[in-house]
Amino acid sequence: MCQHSHENDMTDNHPQSYFLFLPNIAMAAGGRRERAIMLIEEPYGRPRYKNGELWITKARLAVLIVVLFGIVLVITGIALLALASSKSRTCELDEKTPVPGSPLVQYSGPCGYSPEAQRIDLAEFIEKVKATYYKHHPHNIVYNPDIFDWYSDIDVIERVKAEYVAYDPTPTVIKARTDASYSLLKEFNNKDVNLSALKPRERKAVAQIKHYLQHVFGQPYDVNYYSGDWLMGPNLFCWQPVCYHGYDVYNGVGLYHKPYNISDLKLIKAKLETHKAGILQYISNMKMGITKGMVRSIEECIAGADSIKRKYLNVSLYNETEMRLLIVKFSSDQKGKLRDIEWCFLTLKLCGNNFLSGSGNPVLSPPCVGIWKEWFVEPMLHPDYYSNISKEANEEWKREQGMNVDESVKNYLLEYLGKPLHQLIRYLEEEHVHYCVPSNVSSGLGRLPLKYVWFDGKELKDRPTDPTLADGYRLDGYDAYSLIMSYFTTNNMKPNEVHNLGKRQLAKLYPKVIEIAKEVTGINNPTEAIRVFRRKLNSTESFFNNAPIPKNESGKEAHKKCSNLKGAEKYCPKRMLDPKTFEMFYFTGSKHTTPNCPIDLKPDLNPSSGAQSYEGSDVDCSRNALYNIPFFLENLGPRFSEWSVNAHEARPGHHTQVQGNTEHFRDSCHDVLNWLDLETFYPAFTEGWALYSESPLIAEDTDTYKNEPMQRFGMLKWQILRAVRLIADTGLHYYSNFSREDALWYFDKFALDNTDLAEKEVLSQGSSPLAYLQDHLKRYVDCQLDETKEGCDVIFTPPKQTESKRRAKAKRWPVIRKPHRHYT
């Protein structure tokens, strides 16, 4: 019998009602359905009467007792069966408990740890790594799962206020981070781990933690003290920490430093000052890089400047104004008669300086609004940010500072963020670029460090470089590249092995190009067929623009005017522009793998970008995923690459894998292994799937390219481009005798491409670790052949992402994670 009650119903004013449901018994007895539900109501303990007679008779009471007893027996039986089943499984698990020399594993639920994981203290060690990470990366403290999205909790807020500071690129701090990561890696490598005795997610965590610590907490650029690339400034990808001050300010200061009193206002100033210090230190590092011989090529320097300007677009567009002054020099003879006039124009660039107006009153320079237009300062410019400041506190502050609290914070944003960022951009574009070297001197790490300082393309023999760091460590470009390359390959391949792999791929792929050229042109002679085929590839019919792009839509002025969608539509109008795999994927049910979140096309307005890219959304699809297309190419397209690129970036490539993984395969075990999985990123994994999607999935497993030789060439060209990348990337960064011209020759010879796409491809040289994937796939195949093998039940039913807990009401200022962009 089930009792239904509410918390406060046990009073004299609330009589109790008891409901008994007996549908099966009533139906079995042939009774009508209304008899199946019998109501016994005992207000204040008095029996209920029907037609003046007592409703409960002795006979009925006996039947009820028997029925109730039967129900109790049924429920007890079900409970005992469930318990017996659980015990049986427990017994089976106990039989799997490892014994010396046995590979058997005890599984304690999908999220429980195996005895082997407990023996090696896997979770405890990763917790130690996690704590060390946030100790050395206080600017990311808001992403700590113990804190993330809890900025309404007082204790959490106080913790962030105490720990948060901006990223610090001081050399000694970079060294401390590097050494801490390497020390943890050494500690873990000393553990004797029996991988066969671990659960799949634990084996994955072992591979992840090794890769994570090998690459200084899972980062490829600017973080390894011994690589020295932290001296060279931003690159085309702009993955360096200096590119993410906006996210740090938004999350760390904007969300967790809402002021309540005057002390909080002073704390905001102190936190923003750390951003200024970090940005200026980054500039100092680049200046040191010049003296150490760690400098990029001119093309790479320009690409890095373009990329960081995209990160701080409004700072680069609005934080500066030019004032042209006419300077006239008069000369006269001894009698004061005018003899000669000399004149010139002097261009002054102003940002954030006070100057006198015509009336003599100081006014703020108009262009000092760039930082106030950036998305990441919006929380601090909103009136709600100051809603807890009392009127009295504001008046007190105004007496001390001469302005209201909101005006003060606005000024802090300008002084400690806007001006330093503007100074960084100015330094990159107008000063540092003079020290960048011609591409025939160096186009990668392979020829670094330089022996002498270079200036405006000339080697200064009187200024030799010093390639040693303060602690005596000698920088070496070859070693630096090896340290960075393994982040992307996730394996132990040497640069020369990757280089030779690219050459072997070309040997397989290029003959297929010749066959397509013969088919399209109808010419059997290979040399002549390629020559005529090239002409077709470069014709306007191969691109989406039917005529050359107007000159006014290219160059620096166009890059500035067309830096956003509205400007692009107005000033660059000429540039504006899955059925076959349906049976290959599950779109519903327990095996659902495909994403529900839509994907939008978006122009990539970075002038140095030459490749398409993809950005996934979050589990709630709070915004659509993005498929980015280079905007500033000489020609739009080519058309013959469209199908292959779509397969790579969207479905069944990046979008299917990356967004599908986010929506369906992030496990629901909210433990430290889950933190590690969210914290790590493996380009080899994501790019590997996207390449597989191009070929063989689309190229060979469907009839997409049947009777479509040009589209088939587009697919093949991208395969060749990847092979050339292996050669060019390792050549530029590892071989001292390999030049940018050599890389361009490979693109021209084998990919039949001598356009600006190839030039930008050279600039771009630079999930799960593959070792784990290879091992897991082998175990999966073994289980398919024999599902009784140890651990197959876990392999076939891995923990899946639980349905996302959507907020009932979206927050105005949600925590925003730093994005990962996947390049073609």
Image (spheres, rainbow, N blue to C red):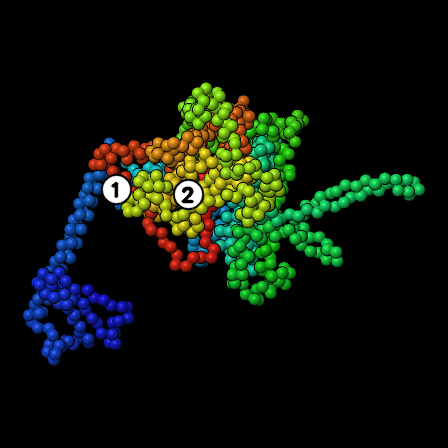
Are discs 2 and 1 less than 8 Å apart at CB?
no
Q: Which mark is residue 32?
A: none
Mark 2 vs mark 1, foreground winner is 2
Q: In the rendered structure, which amino acid carries the disc numbered 2?
A: Glu
| Residue located at (25% from left, 42% from top) | 107
Q: Which mark is residue 107?
A: 1
Most extreme residue toward the left, as rendered?
Answer: 59
Q: Which mark is residue 679?
A: 2
Residue 819 showing in the rendered view = no
Within the image, what quadrant is residue 470 found in?
Answer: top right
Residue 32 showing in the rendered view = yes
Compare residues 498 and 591 and report the one nearer the observer: 591
In percent of width and height, residue 86 lies at 19, 48
In percent of width and height, residue 37 lies at 15, 67
In percent of width and height, residue 196 lies at 28, 34
Question: Alpha-carbon neighbours of circle 2 within 10 Å: few (<14), some, or many (≥20)?
Answer: some
| Residue located at (48% from left, 20% from top) | 527
| Residue located at (45% from left, 26% from top) | 521
Compare residues 230 and 515 and report the one nearer the observer: 515
